[in-house]
Every structure is written in C-alpha cells, then in structure tokens.
Image (cartoon, rainbow, N blue to C red):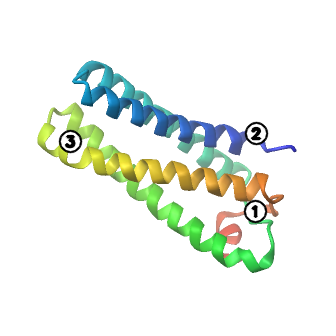
Amino acid sequence: MEVPLLPTISTLFIVLSAILVAIGWYLIKRKKVIAHQKTMIAAAGSAVLFFIIYISRTVFIGNTAFGGPDDLKIYYTVFLVFHIILATTGAVFGVITIVAGLKNNLVRHRKIGPVTSVIWFFTAITGVAVYLLLYVFYKGGETTSVFKAIWGF
C-alpha cells in the first residue's frame, strides 16, 4: 500500500499535537507548570506545522476527493464538514487558551483549557479518520480544488 507523503506527514503532526496535549494535561495535574507550558507550546507548534503543510498542499497541489463508493460519499462529506468545523473551533479555542496562559490569565486558561483539549482530541481523531478514508481504506479520488473535492463543483 502506498500513501501520499504530505498528507501522511501532516496527519502525523496533528496526532503528535494531540499526544502532546494529553501529556501537557498530565503534567499540569502533577503541578509541573514549566513542563506543562513547554509541552503545550510544542503541541501548538506541531499543530502549526500540520496547518502549514495542509495549506501548502491545498494551495500548490489541491485537495483529494473521496474515492470510495458513491453511496458512502454523502456520509464522508458530512463527516468531513463536521471535522472542518471541529478543527476550526479547536484552533480558535487553542489560540485563546494559549494566549490566556502566556498572559498569566489563569482563570480564563483553566476554564477553557480542558474544553479546548477535548475539542482538539476529537479534531485529531476525526482527522485521522478522514486520512484513513481518503488514502488507506479507499484509493483517493482526483486531486483538485478544495471546493470541487468537498462539494463536487
């Protein structure tokens, strides 16, 4: 089985970011504040690397359409839209959470940090599922613009 390089690398970065968030959560529960900060910055960096690879591939190469059975396409599309909304929400919450932590606004950071983490875990899980559906379980469809890949036009 041959998988495309850039989607595989970007997916690994998003998984790494979720693993680092889990480690960061563990560290803060153990009151290891400095280790928590460094780990969460690394998690954010990993997510940014994912995003840079994803956007670069989208701009320069395009997006891959679903190549599975036609009767599953609607389910894949709904799942993909859910993942995109989740990822966007997680990214916005992530920025707010990191900024609150860096500005030492610990009331806000502690309030939204756990929510952000859960959103990010689901983002990573659904991202891996999208990757598996596009490149592992089914052979990817044509690589084309993002609008055509998602909506068919």
Which comes sooner in the sequence, label 2 or label 1?
2
Along the line of sight, which residue is nearer the eye, 71 or 52?
71
The residue that label 3 is drawn on is 109
In the rendered image, residue 83, in percent from the top left (x then y), is placed at: 52, 61
In the rendered image, residue 8, in percent from the top left (x then y), is placed at: 70, 41
In the rendered image, residue 57, in percent from the top left (x then y), is placed at: 68, 47
Mark 1: few/some/many CA within 10 Å (<14, 14-19, 20+):
some
The residue that label 2 is drawn on is 5
Residue 123 is left or right of residue 25, and the answer is right
- Which label belongs to residue 144? 1
Most distant residue in the right direction: 1
Q: Nearer the viewer, mark 2 or mark 1?
A: 2
- The structure residue drawn at horizontal position 25% and vertical position 39%, both measured from the top left corner, is 99
- The structure residue drawn at horizontal position 64% and vertical position 75%, both measured from the top left corner, is 75
Q: Amino acid at mark 2?
A: Leu
CA–CA distance in space, label 3 to label 1: 40 Å
CA–CA distance in space, label 2 to label 1: 17 Å
Q: Quadrant of the N terminus?
A: top right
User: What is the secondary structure assignment of the residue under circle 2?
Assistant: helix
CA–CA distance in space, label 3 to label 2: 36 Å
User: What is the secondary structure assignment of the residue under circle 1?
Assistant: strand
- The structure residue drawn at horizontal position 74% and vertical position 65%, both measured from the top left corner, is 65
Which comes sooner in the sequence, label 3 or label 2?
2
Q: Nearer the viewer, mark 3 or mark 1?
A: 3
Which comes sooner in the sequence, label 3 or label 1?
3
| Residue 63 in sight here | no
Q: Marks 1 and 3: in contact by CB < 8 Å?
A: no
- The structure residue drawn at horizontal position 51% and vertical position 67%, both measured from the top left corner, is 82
Mark 2: few/some/many CA within 10 Å (<14, 14-19, 20+):
few
Q: Quadrant of the C terminus?
A: bottom right
- Asked where in the image residue 32 lies, by quadrant, the reply is top left
